């Protein structure tokens, strides 16, 4: 049977404006970093359909999402063609270029050649004429910022992207990027930084910079690579992400970190939320944050995350107690990019 979206899809989701610009995003967006690669079509299809039925209109990708590289965009393109094509004008689809994608000197970072070639490849994989947001995925210290931002401007001018964004840029480079784009006539719409209860690097400077330039903020890794879930409350289970020593190193789950996680879990329990739900709600407490990106491996996990929307409010006492445990835990894997 052909997919028909729920008539109630816009009744419970909140939508927030990107800074001072007109585009609104759902408070919770779906990222396709993992679990949407090759051989994941049917689970991905079920999650994407369910997300849209619940008002998630924004789907966030990058050229190298998978695994393997490019396969998440291919999977999304197949679901778009099968189910979501009639709703294209209700969707915000984003992709990025910046990390390694193909061999040789033109396959990563921020040169004009790489950025624009990557976008063309992404559009072909997804079967799109344009994406809504195109990001510079990381700051390139060896390429003039004018070149990278000029490539984003060209993408918008050529109609291959509607808006320009950046990811994991420092506050200083964010201001510079916004100034360059503004002079070209393409405003900086949004910044995508990592942010969580255990990774609060954006608070001292970046959020103020975004407010000053009028850009939105969409946070990624709000669950700190899974640390802010009930999975690790009793240690590292066999087969979990941490047990494989990949993007979540077992060394991060030391006694100090586990003590913080258990303390936060106790607060979440008193709020009637899972730890993951409270962690997501907490990232949205600041009005300068437009949206927070979740990942999901199943429809059930997706629904649990969206349950965060049922309780987004925090009392001053709750925030003060959370601050006792919500301190840096060395989980910012993208610190190098935002430090340049």
Image: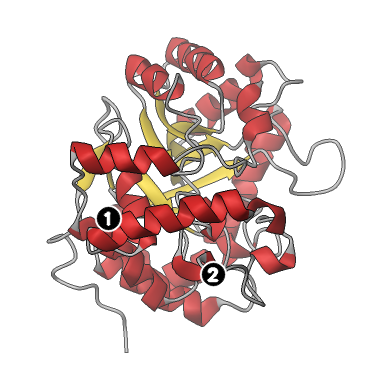
Left or right: 288, with 121 as reference point: left
Q: Which of 286 and 294 is in front in this view?
A: 286
Q: Nearer the viewer, residue 282 or 98?
A: 282
Which residue is at the far right? 104
Q: Which residue is drawn at 72% across and 32% down?
A: 113
Q: Given contact means CB atoms under 8 Å apart, are the residues at marks 1 and 2 in contact?
A: no
Helix, strand or loop status at disc 1: helix
Q: Which residue is drawn at 57% across and 60% down?
A: 73
Where residue 165 appears, as percent x and y from the top left, is 47, 32
Dot 2 alpha-carbon crowd within 10 angstroms: few under 14, some 14 to 19, many 20 or more: few
Q: Distance between the residues labelled 1 and 2?
A: 42 Å
- The quadrant in which residue 210 appears is top left
Q: Nearer the viewer, residue 170 or 136?
A: 170
> Can the viewer see residue 318 in this picture?
yes
- Vertical relation: 240 (above or below) 258: below
Left or right: 51, with 100 as reference point: left
Where residue 70 appears, as percent x and y from the top left, is 65, 59
Q: Residue 43, labelled with which disc? A: none
Left or right: 232, with 86 as reference point: right
Q: Which residue is drawn at 13% across and 69% down?
A: 8
Dot 1 alpha-carbon crowd within 10 angstroms: few under 14, some 14 to 19, many 20 or more: some
Q: Residue 90, labelled with which disc? A: 1
Task: Name the residue tied to disc 2.
Answer: 234
Where residue 87 appears, as percent x and y from the top left, is 29, 62
Helix, strand or loop status at disc 2: loop
> Can the viewer see residue 285 in this picture?
no
Looking at the rendered image, the quarter that the C terminus falls into is top right
Closer to the eye: label 1 or 2:
2
- The quadrant in which residue 13 appears is bottom left
- Vertical relation: 12 (above or below) 130: below
Looking at the rendered image, the quarter that the N terminus falls into is bottom left
């Amino acid at each position: 049977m052909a997919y028909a979206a729920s008539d109630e899809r816009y009744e419970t989701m909140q939508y927030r404006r990107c800074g001072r610009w007109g585009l609104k995003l759902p408070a919770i967006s779906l990222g396709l970093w993992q679990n949407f690669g090759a051989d994941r079509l049917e689970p991905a299809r079920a999650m994407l359909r369910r997300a849209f039925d619940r008002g998630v209109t924004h789907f966030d990708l990058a050229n190298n999402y998978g695994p393997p590289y490019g396969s998440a965009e291919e999977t999304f393109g197949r679901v778009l063609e099968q189910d979501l094509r009639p709703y294209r004008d209700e969707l915000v689809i984003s992709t990025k270029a910046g990390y390694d994608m193909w061999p040789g000197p033109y396959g990563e970072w921020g040169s004009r050649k790489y950025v624009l070639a990557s976008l063309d490849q992404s559009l072909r994989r997804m079967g799109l004429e344009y994406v809504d947001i195109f990001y510079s995925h990381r700051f390139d210290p060896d390429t003039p910022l004018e070149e990278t931002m000029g490539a984003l401007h060209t993408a918008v001018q050529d109609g291959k992207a509607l808006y320009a964004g950046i990811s994991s840029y420092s506050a200083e480079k964010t201001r510079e990027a916004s100034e360059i784009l503004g002079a070209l006539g393409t405003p900086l719409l949004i910044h995508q930084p990592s942010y969580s209860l255990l990774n609060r690097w954006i608070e001292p400077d970046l959020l103020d910079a975004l407010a000053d330039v009028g850009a939105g903020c969409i946070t990624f890794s709000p669950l700190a690579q899974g640390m802010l879930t009930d999975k690790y409350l009793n240690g590292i289970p066999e087969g979990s992400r941490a047990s494989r020593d990949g993007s979540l190193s077992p060394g991060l789950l030391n006694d100090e970190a586990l003590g913080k996680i258990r303390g936060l879990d106790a607060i979440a329990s008193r709020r009637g939320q899972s730890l993951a739900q409270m962690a997501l709600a907490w990232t949205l407490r600041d009005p300068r944050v437009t949206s927070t990106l979740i990942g999901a491996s199943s429809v059930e996990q997706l629904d649990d995350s969206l349950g965060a929307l049922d309780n987004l409010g925090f009392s001053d006492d709750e925030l003060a107690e959370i601050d006792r445990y919500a301190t840096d835990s060395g989980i910012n894997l993208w610190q190098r990019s935002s430090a340049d």
